[in-house]
Amino acid sequence: MRNLFENKLKVYLVLGLLGLVGVISGLNLSISLFPNISRPTVGLWINYVNIEKSDFLENYGYDLERELDTLKNGKIKIENVTAEFYDDGLFMQILFDWGTDAEDAYREIRSITNQWQNSLPQETADTLQVWQWNENTGYLSISFFSQNKTIDELYQHLDPILTPGLNAAKGFEEALLFNPKKKEVRIELNPLKMAELGIYPREIQSMITQKMRSYIGGSIRSGDNKLQLNLVGNEKSIDGLKNIRLYKGDKSFLLSEIAKIYFAPHSTRKRIFKTDGKESLIVWAKPKAGANVKEATESIIKLIKDKEPEFDKDVSYKVLVDPSEFIRSAIGNVFKSVAIASCLAVLVLFLFMGSLRNVSSAFIEIPFSIILAFILMEIFDMNLNLISLGGMALAAGMNVDASIVVLENIIRHFHMSKEQTNNDFSYAYKCEVILKALKEVWRPIVVSTITTLIVFTPLVFTKDLTNAVLGDLAKAVIFSHGFACLIALIIVPLVRTQIINRESLHSKSILDRPMSKFEVFYQRTLYFFINNLKARLALFIGIPTLLILSLMLVMPEIPKELIGKPHTDWVILKVQSDTAKSVKDIEVLIQKAELKVNELFGDEISYNFMQIRRENNGNLMLRLRDKSQVENFQDRLKEAFPNTPEVRFSIFPWNPAELPLPHYPDIEVHIKGKDLNAMSSAGEQLLVGIKENKIDDNMWSEPNLKKSEKFLVLPFDSIWQEIQKSGSSVSARDILDITMLADSGKRISELYENGEKTDIVMKFPDKYKLNDASLAAFPLKISEKIIPLSSLVDLKKVESAPSNIRFNSENLIKLKSELSKEKKDNKETIKANIQNYLDKEKDHFKGVSIELVDENQDLTKALAQLYQSILISLILIAFVLMLQFGNVLNVLTVLLAIPLGLIGVIIALYIFDSTLSLNSALGVILLNGIAVNNSILLVDFANREFEAGNDALNSILNASKQRLRPILITSLTSILGMLPIAFGMGEGGEILQPLGIAVSCGLWVSTFLTIVIIPLVHYSVLKRNEKGRGFGFVNETLRESINNFESPEVTQ
Amino acid sequence: MGNLIKIAFIACLCTNYTFAADKKPEKKIAEVFVQEIKKESFEQISEYPIVLKSRADSKIKSPINGVVADIKKKLGDTVQENEVIAILRQQQGGFDYQPLKVRSPIAGKISNINVHRGEYVNIGDLVIEVLDPTEIYGRIEVPVRDHKIIQPNQPVKIELQQVNKLDVKGKVAGISSAADPMTGTLSADVEILDKDEFPIGIIGHAKVNRGAKEVMLIQESALNYKGDDIYVKIVDDKNLVTNRSIKIGGKKAGKVEVLDGLKTDEQIIVRSNGFVAPGDEVKIVRRKE
């Protein structure tokens, strides 16, 4: 260290260089919304086409499940597979383990599905879609609308302006201008004309696709060139389609003579988007995993701003979701927290030490630790995200502790030594004093830093959800806190060699006198307890009792959640109606709701966005002007929109910046078994029974157990045999084609219109849409007669097999419930009642297993991992303490500080209506680290006094007095530094708020109890050792001054 | 000071428990739509494709091997009995062409021209069809399993979309007794009662009215299921709810036939704004007939 003082310029240069590297690293770090740790999901959809649901499962579904099972133990692990068998197709969701690379996951699934696809009939195989999604990057969404243009006109106007820039944008999986009004080219066949001609859809489809194809007919030489001969098919346009000539027997006709051909709304993609009532297009962009989300999304916002002059005057846009906005706020939050922590640290130091000159460099020392942390963050491939930024805001308050201890000790040593050498204030003298002060505290500082790092290190090695939520936070704290120790041991003393002078030491702090009185009072209190066995016992029994009571009575009352949800300015009003049969119907209902919302709450809303994707429900998304009013607004909205028999409303907040964690309902029952009908029946009966017995009327099932019907098409064999004998080409496949075209139609090809790919769909008029009477009367020409379809096949309406969800290759029906706010307090009672009901009823259901599951399974697992980490950290702390003290009793004394803080945490979480979550559990961990630091210093100083020859009493009294001021300063700076977090300030502040409350309030109680209990306990230890060595000298002056309740300095 | 803190802490706990104890859930009365049960007359309709034909229908075939020299009429033209409608020329090696006049055996309209000028025809090839539009009738093919329900004199409504005539009246004239094994159908003739001219050969839809029956129909949304049990929720005159099991028949267009279990004038719930259990009181906000 002396060498450093002698070569201070070199040291400053090195530090300056490191600082520069830190700044560059910080600027290079990619900025995302959420941590890189992700749990990728791959989705799959396939239409059965002509295969019945149960046949598909038997012949193809089980095969796919078996293939996917092989990945459960492989290098790339699947966590679970959910397969939903709907009436017309299969939707599968494959969830991978935390930390799996998204690209690898997708490749594995694609490789399996490509093989599986080969076993499927061609028409079914052609409908397979596989995609992946990552929720941790968020997405950008901007709506465009116009006063005067239709949606198609708006699209034609904006597409050439924006699409090239969107296609060129970097860092996105997908960036496009989305037109919800996608069109298709519809060939609406006339069954009556077809019957006249005796032609079937299959023949028409074959002729159309042939005519549209182009063929290569070899090549011919022309001079030196070889030219290809192309037989060009019909022009791929609507007019080209209309002019296709078809043949049947000796008759020929144009397609337009037997069909209407026109542009129609897409039969499967029916969506409506509106902004403030105007139909809208959406610019939608999904960042890639690992991309710099902030940079990428800002580039698109900039693109739109740059192109804005090219928009027509009537075109406007609104940014609906912008991840870079949250990131900017979170970064701003960090700067604010660091600034506040720095200012508060300097203020507290100034109040206690009395000299701004001596303490002002803390303004640089605090942020410097964070800048240096960027270097390690880049080395470990971390990114800046809401969680790691939160970790930095957290660390800001903690990082100053070591510097305070060093600084306080330096100034104390200067005060002590000035009595001996009044005139000498040379650089050498200053170095000596500083070195001496540093020598006293460096070891406990290193040990306490190590204990703090030990406390956080196991979190880095947790898995799954815990790591996803806390991993980046823990790393950010470890890196910055580690550097804070180096700063405390190197920069703080080095800078003081230059800025401390005689005048700065003479200045008295305004707290000097009150502190001195408090120190005497404190010593007197300790003396009282030491000499009063009953009082000591009362304390030793009372404190643990309070702890036990808090754990048993108060902790169960604290609500549990995985992680705090950030406040938002979006509220969604979801509208559902079973009477709505089309998107238009639901649009009308939502428009009514919109009018009412504008009438009642118009002033409070900035704008609204309507989103309809289904025929029976849609969302009206409301953006509030004042985020703080969200809860109150929701309550008033609920009152204004009660459910009616026709329409159901749900109202809930929505925050695109929320961590994409799994959401579990309040209550969940699983029904498993092999027989789907038995499971479905059980589910239905339980649902009705639970509601009828008034246990819970909010329950619903997944899948929906509502009975549905289907038509079975049963050919009359004898007639088909006659038809085949006659040599006719008509077959049962033709009948299936007819039913398909009558229902949703069949995609037969595509064409490009105005540069856009458009599906060509063949179908029959809606009259035949599986209306049994009309379909039964469908005309067919057989043997020169026009006969109804029902003479060839029996169209039998039967109950459809229940919808089926398979979870990890097992049939599963879930009954779920989300309790209303009023019922949440009674959750455990409701759960117990459901359990009782299930126990009573389950014997009625043979062949199914019914179980009430732990809906908090992720939280339980995560907390279990945290408890494990806490245990490991305690063992490691004990080990480090053993190295420091070499004495089991000393170690146990220090560790006693840990449970003391819990009392404050539990009571604070309860009083401030906070939650028991991963972050409040982290607050407990943090608190343990800080409390242990104080204990280490107390015990260490007491031991030094004892080793110097003092008796147990004086050792404790002296050490406690010496350590009181720095303990109070460090605790105050930590508490004040945590206050912005405890108040939930800044964007996303609610996520860390339970942590802030736990630490700041817990630290009050912990500090108070630590400075009282630890000395008392250690006194017993030293007293025991004292018996071994005899008595030491007694400081009579000190005892007298304590008895007189006067500061010893004042009497001197 | 310590006591103050203790008191404040205990007070907080007590307050919380008091508030919790006061939180009794409010009793909510569900709002419902109901349907009053009435017996309705339900028309039983069977639908089939129908082809328009003429009883007076002449298929004129070529009597010679030769060439079509001329066609005097076009499709849809009116012809008189014995009017010349086409000229054929006999063709034999070494001889001059002998023209042959083709005449219509009946008065009527040209319904089909199967040849064109200059085309070679053999003996027996169909040349032209003439039919009498005043002798028009409809032909439906009835699946064998419907043979008992389609009876003569049943009224028929014919929809001819291709000529935009959607309400042509007719009645079942007769039904054959032998089924065609190739098609599995019995042929039934429909007498057209509307005196109008319709193009022959076009296909439409025929809806045969088999008569009305009295049925009890309810909205499908009124049905509830509990395992194999199908039940409805009845609202009595005190607005209290009871469950009643019923037997149902066929469903059509969102309605279900009730075979047993309900009486006329009873009120059943078709929609509600929340779950309604037996014994609950409800508020009727709308009645559906």
Image (cartoon, rainbow, N blue to C red):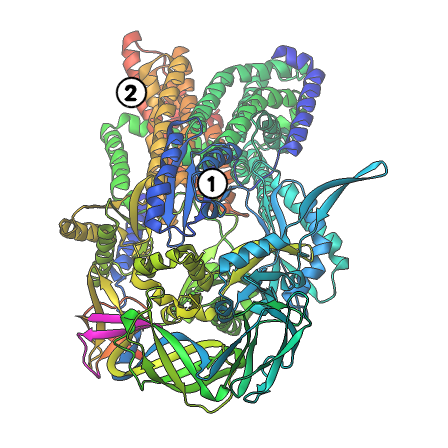
The residue singled out by tag 2 in the image is: A1020
Is residue B260 shown in magenta? yes
- Residue B26 x, y percent position in the rendering: 27, 67
Q: Residue at x 45, y 41 (%)?
A: A996
Range of residues picked out in magenta: B247-265
- Residue A462 x, y percent position in the rendering: 41, 29
The residue singled out by tag 1 in the image is: A42
Q: Chain letter of disc 2?
A: A
Secondary structure category for the residue under label 2:
helix
- Residue A846 x, y percent position in the rendering: 16, 48
Given residues A479 and A159, the one toward you in this image is: A159
Identify residue type, mark 1.
Answer: Val
Asked whether the viewer can see residue A184, the reply is yes
Q: Is residue A525 left or right of residue B116?
A: left
Identify residue type, mark 2.
Answer: Ser
**Dominant secondary structure, magenta:** strand
Q: Residue furthest top?
A: A1029
Q: Is residue A864 left or right of residue A299?
A: left
